[in-house]
Each structure stands twice: as structure tokens, then as C-alpha cells.
């Protein structure tokens, strides 16, 4: 597996890195396991002090950190800055709240006595993280687990190696012991054959594709290891009426095109009731046509390149398959004839089940619009997807929108706003979008030993 920075805006390979040897991987696991025995004993208040220092480093260096991921994976610079700010907030959130979360809950035993369930650490954890949010994905895994007293080995995506290294460096600069957080440039085979089977490793968290999730889950299951999986999404964006149209369209463009359309929680399927369909689609298409790809290093750019030429070409194949089978291109639909991984913001209509675009996740700036007769049909179409990560429902009657949201089979549904994230809100999905939750109080529980401490009834 190659680790290299290739600027997707130019196609230029900037820097390459060697994959670790098997012995280096074994040594990393051994170091992490040794560190765990002492890190778990460090007072939570001291862990929190270090984590606050980490948050401070992200804020102090936000411009440099943002520019780095823009170069590596093409995120528009303004959005990269926002990601760095969110990461700082996540580290602060767990520094502020972990001690309270770890107190657990008091039970009232039917047999008498006193019982309390507390959250305790479990050991070494492996994080396998993707390129599309190079800092955020790491933070939401590492922050709660390091605060809990676990140690972390992090295998990042091959196209963001510099972002991977700088995060390890920031842990060290913040004052954490060297082996609390270890970055490894590991291959997939090393993950499957060395890291996951090691008895010291107690769990694996993966954010990535269905294929990667299934492979890691199979290996983890064979070795009796806990997994958290955040996989793909094909989020519905349900429009119940044409009221507040300007805001709904704006949210639709933001929800579909942010991060260059490369977020699991991007709105991908726009399901519109027939009374509102023509008006919404006309305005939405016009707005998408106004989204022009530009230099991701320009603070004003909203849509940059895809992460790689190969990723762009895969999306173009999905679009072409739809067109060949009768879909209508309302906007865009073409790649740009210049170096790098560029394509136009695109809207497709008349997509039917035999097309790839109907059931597959399109991981790029392509919106698919559907017309339905009523809310029941909207829910039926929304739930027909094999995915269930996020979703949005827009309507002037908020109570009716909430009722529809409750019927959508998804881990997260936002009413009158596009799917978002925050340190204190749980994040995760159902069906083929994965298992487990990150962020909020739930995020610290996934790899915790929920330890019962029981004392007998006093005589």
C-alpha cells in the first residue's frame, strides 16, 4: 500500500512515504500495550489538561493545518479551516466532560446493597480512518478513548500521510506520553494479520467503505474484537412543500456539494413531493449550475477537485451508466479537461432502479432528484436504500416534518437543516451504514468496560 501526497488540484505527487515493516508494526503494538499499563493510571484531570493543550495547538495552527489537508485531498480552504476548528472543539468537549461520563450510573439492585456501573478503559485500540475529513475522523475516535485511558494506534488513509504524521506530532507537543497515540503507515495485510489478532488490541474503529468495513469486521469477529463501523451513506433530503424555498435550496446545495460532495452524510437523494417538485428542481438546478469548481486554496472557493482522478472517473462511470439507461442530466455531468480530479457539479433526474446511481453511493458532487406523490411515498423511497446514516426533512409544518423524520430508517435525521455534526451529538448509522456511535456521551462508551461495582446490603 502506497502512502503519498498527490495534490488532486494538479495531479502532482508532492511527497511519498515508506510503508512500515512487519517488525515496526509489531513494535508499535508492543509499545502501545506497554504505555497502556501506565496511561490508564493517570488521573483524569491530568488527561484533560493535556487534551485542552491539544485543542489549543489546533487553534493556534489552524491556517497551516487547514492548508495541509487542502493540498492532500482537495477540500476548499474555508471548509478545511472549519474542520480544524471543529476538531479543537471535540478535544475540548471530552476534556471537559469525560470525568462526568466515566462516573456511569447508579443502580438499585433487587437483591439489596449498592451497585454502580462505571466506565473503565480496556486497552489498545486500532483506528482506521479515511481521507475525506483527515482530522475530524481521527478526533472523534481518539479524543474519547484517550480520555478514557485507552491507547491508540492510528492507520490513516494512504493519500493523507502528512495529515497523519502531524496529528501524532501534536499529541507529542501537547505533552502526552509518546506511545499514547502512535501513527503507523501499515498495509491492509498488516492490519489483518498483525494488528487486529494481537491479544493487546481490544477493538477496532473504522470509518470508510462498505467493503473495508466488511473485511475489518470479519477479521475482528474471528479474533473476538469489538468494532465500531461508520460506513457509506445515501442520505435522503425530503422536501414536503415549496415554502421557504430559498432557504431549502441553499441548504440542499450546501448539503450535497460541501467537502466536494465527498462526505458520507452529504444529501444525495432529493425526494420532493409532486406539488413542490417543479419549483424546487428548477431553483435547485439553477443554484447548482452556479457552483463553479475553483482553486481549493482560494478562501472563496466552495467546490474543489475530487480527492483523486480515479475517484472522479468512478463517479463519471456512475453518471454515464444512468444516462445510458435513460436518466436526464439537468446540470453538469462532465469532467473538466485539465490536470487534476475535476468535474462539474451535477444534477440527475429520471433515475430508476436498474441504474447504478439508484442504489450506490455517489461519492462526489452529484445530486439525484426524485418526484413522489406524498409523504408516505417519500418515506418509502427514503427507506428503500441499503444505507441509513443521515437524512433531512424540510417542511413549513415542523410537527409534520418531525413525524416524517421519525419514520426514516436512519441513525440521524435533521429537520429543516442539512445533516451536520457537533461534539455533543451522537454520530452513526444503521443498516449498511455501520454499527456503533461516536461523539457525545455515547462516543466514550463504545470501547469502555462498563464495569459493575457491587457492595452488599448492610446488616
Image (cartoon, rainbow, N blue to C red):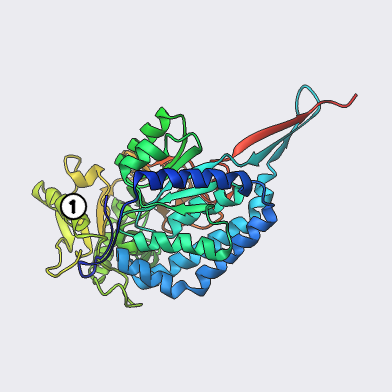
The residue carrying pointer 1 sits among few (fewer than 14), some (14 to 19) or many (20 or more) residues within 10 Å by Cα, namely some
Viewer-side residue, 204 vs 404: 204
Viewer-side residue, 207 vs 108: 207
Q: Please, is residue 93 above or below residue 445 in the view?
A: below
Q: Residue furthest right?
A: 459
Q: Quadrant of residue 396?
A: bottom left
Report the number of discs: 1
Q: Residue 403 appears at what percent x and percent y?
A: 47, 45
At 50% across and 53% down in the image, what residue appears? Answer: 181
Q: Residue furthest left?
A: 324
Q: Residue 342 appears at what percent x and percent y?
A: 20, 65
Q: Residue 236 appears at what percent x and percent y?
A: 35, 49
Screen quadrant of the C terminus = top right
> Is 227 left, or right, of 449 in this rendering?
left
Q: Please, is residue 227 above or below residue 172 in the view?
A: above
* Any part of residue 349 in sight: yes
Viewer-side residue, 365 vs 199: 199
Q: Residue furthest front?
A: 23
At 46% across and 61% down in the image, what residue appears? Answer: 167
- Numbered disc 1: secondary structure: helix
Viewer-side residue, 127 vs 229: 127
Q: Which residue is mark 1?
A: 314
Q: Please, is residue 144 above or below residue 330 in the view?
A: above
Q: Quadrant of residue 339?
A: bottom left
Amino acid at each position: 500500500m502506497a502512502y503519498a501526497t498527490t495534490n488532486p488540484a494538479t495531479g502532482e505527487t508532492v511527497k511519498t512515504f515508506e510503508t512500515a515493516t512487519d517488525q515496526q508494526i509489531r513494535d508499535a503494538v508492543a509499545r502501545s500495550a506497554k504505555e497502556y499499563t501506565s496511561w490508564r493510571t493517570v488521573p483524569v484531570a491530568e488527561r484533560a489538561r493535556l487534551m485542552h493543550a491539544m485543542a489549543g495547538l489546533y487553534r493556534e495552527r489552524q491556517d497551516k493545518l487547514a492548508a495541509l489537508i487542502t493540498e492532500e485531498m482537495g477540500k476548499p480552504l474555508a471548509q478545511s479551516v472549519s474542520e480544524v476548528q471543529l476538531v479543537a472543539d471535540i478535544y475540548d468537549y471530552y476534556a471537559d466532560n469525560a470525568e462526568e461520563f466515566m462516573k456511569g450510573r447508579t443502580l438499585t439492585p433487587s437483591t439489596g446493597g449498592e451497585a454502580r456501573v462505571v466506565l473503565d478503559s480496556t486497552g489498545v485500540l486500532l483506528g482506521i480512518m479515511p481521507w475525506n475529513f483527515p482530522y475530524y475522523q481521527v478526533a472523534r475516535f481518539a479524543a474519547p478513548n484517550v480520555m478514557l485511558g485507552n491507547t491508540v494506534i492510528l492507520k490513516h488513509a494512504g493519500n493523507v500521510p502528512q495529515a497523519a504524521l502531524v496529528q501524532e506530532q501534536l499529541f507529542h507537543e501537547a505533552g502526552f506520553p509518546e506511545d499514547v497515540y502512535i501513527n503507523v503507515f501499515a498495509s491492509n495485510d498488516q492490519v489483518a494479520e498483525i494488528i487486529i489478532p494481537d491479544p493487546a488490541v481490544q477493538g477496532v474503529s473504522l470509518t470508510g467503505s462498505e467493503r473495508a468495513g466488511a473485511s475489518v469486521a470479519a477479521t475482528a469477529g474471528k479474533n473476538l474484537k469489538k468494532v465500531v463501523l461508520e460506513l457509506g451513506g445515501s442520505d435522503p433530503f425530503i422536501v414536503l412543500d415549496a415554502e421557504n424555498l430559498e432557504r431549502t435550496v441553499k441548504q440542499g446545495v450546501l448539503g450535497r456539494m460541501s467537502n466536494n460532495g465527498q462526505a458520507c452524510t452529504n444529501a444525495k437523494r432529493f425526494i420532493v413531493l409532486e406539488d413542490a417538485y417543479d419549483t424546487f428542481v428548477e431553483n435547485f438546478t439553477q443554484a447548482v449550475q452556479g457552483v463553479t469548481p475553483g482553486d481549493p486554496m482560494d478562501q472563496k472557493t466552495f467546490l474543489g477537485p475530487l480527492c483523486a482522478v480515479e475517484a472522479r472517473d468512478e463517479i463519471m462511470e456512475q453518471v454515464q451508466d444512468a444516462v445510458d439507461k435513460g436518466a436526464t442530466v439537468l446540470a453538469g455531468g462532465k469532467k473538466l479537461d485539465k490536470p487534476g480530479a475535476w468535474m462539474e457539479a451535477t444534477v440527475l433526474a429520471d433515475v430508476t432502479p436498474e441504474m447504478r446511481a439508484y442504489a450506490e453511493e455517489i461519492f462526489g458532487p452529484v445530486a439525484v432528484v426524485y418526484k413522489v406523490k406524498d409523504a408516505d411515498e417519500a418515506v418509502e423511497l427514503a427507506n428503500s436504500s441499503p444505507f441509513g446514516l443521515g437524512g433531512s426533512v424540510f417542511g413549513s409544518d415542523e410537527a409534520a416534518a418531525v413525524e416524517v423524520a421519525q419514520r426514516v430508517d436512519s441513525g440521524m435525521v435533521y429537520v429543516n437543516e442539512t445533516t451536520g455534526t457537533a461534539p455533543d451529538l451522537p454520530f452513526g448509522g444503521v443498516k449498511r451504514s455501520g454499527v456503533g456511535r461516536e461523539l457525545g456521551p455515547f462516543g466514550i462508551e463504545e470501547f469502555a468496560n462498563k464495569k459493575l461495582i457491587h457492595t452488599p446490603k448492610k446488616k
